[in-house]
């Protein structure tokens, strides 16, 4: 899958994300959220803007931040837990075909 908006707009989140779901996937996977609910809210907001794609699946991964530097031991206190999201976006064939038929007239 390719995106016609390219890599030059990789760091322009608001406008670029609504037009290119592949770009959104890259940026959301790189972002860490404070909780699972904030991550799912960000994904649902973004998913509403997509016309020709839909969310297939998503998963959360917990990343622990420890209170000390270096390799953590079993007794090292956890400072915070951040959540990273991995989502799979697929093209919506029905909407794409419908748009093609409307454009052919």
Image (tube, rainbow, N blue to C red):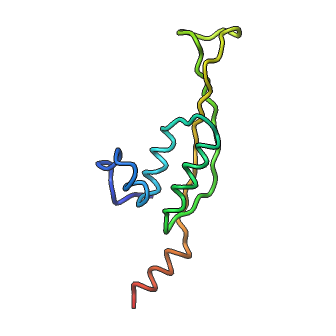
Residue 31 locus on image (x, y percent): 49, 38
Residue 33: quarter of image: top right
**62 or 46: nearer the viewer:** 46
Is 64 situated above or below 9?
above
Residue at 70%, 10% in the rendered image: 74
Q: Is residue 7 left or right of residue 85?
A: left
Q: How many marks?
A: 0
Quadrant location, the N terminus: bottom left
Residue at 50%, 81% in the rendered image: 98
Residue 6 locus on image (x, y percent): 32, 53
Q: Is residue 100 left or right of residue 87?
A: left
Quadrant location, the C terminus: bottom left
Is 74 situated above or below 13?
above
Q: Is residue 10 left or right of residue 27?
A: left
Residue at 57%, 62% in the rendered image: 54
Residue 68 locus on image (x, y percent): 56, 9
Residue pushed farthest right? 74
Is 58 situated above or below 104?
above
Residue at 40%, 57% in the rendered image: 2
Residue pushed farthest bottom? 105
Residue 60 locus on image (x, y percent): 64, 40
Is 9 situated above or below 72?
below
């Amino acid at each position: 899958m390719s995106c016609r908006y390219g890599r030059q707009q990789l760091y322009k989140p608001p406008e670029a994300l609504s037009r290119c779901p592949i770009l959104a996937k890259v940026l959301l996977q790189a972002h860490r959220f404070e909780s699972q609910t904030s991550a799912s809210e960000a994904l649902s907001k973004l998913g509403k803007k997509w016309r020709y794609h839909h969310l297939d699946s998503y998963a959360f991964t917990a990343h622990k931040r420890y209170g000390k530097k270096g390799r953590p031991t079993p007794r090292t206190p956890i400072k915070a837990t951040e959540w990273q999201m991995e989502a799979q976006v697929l093209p919506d064939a029905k909407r794409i075909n419908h748009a093609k038929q409307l454009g052919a007239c």
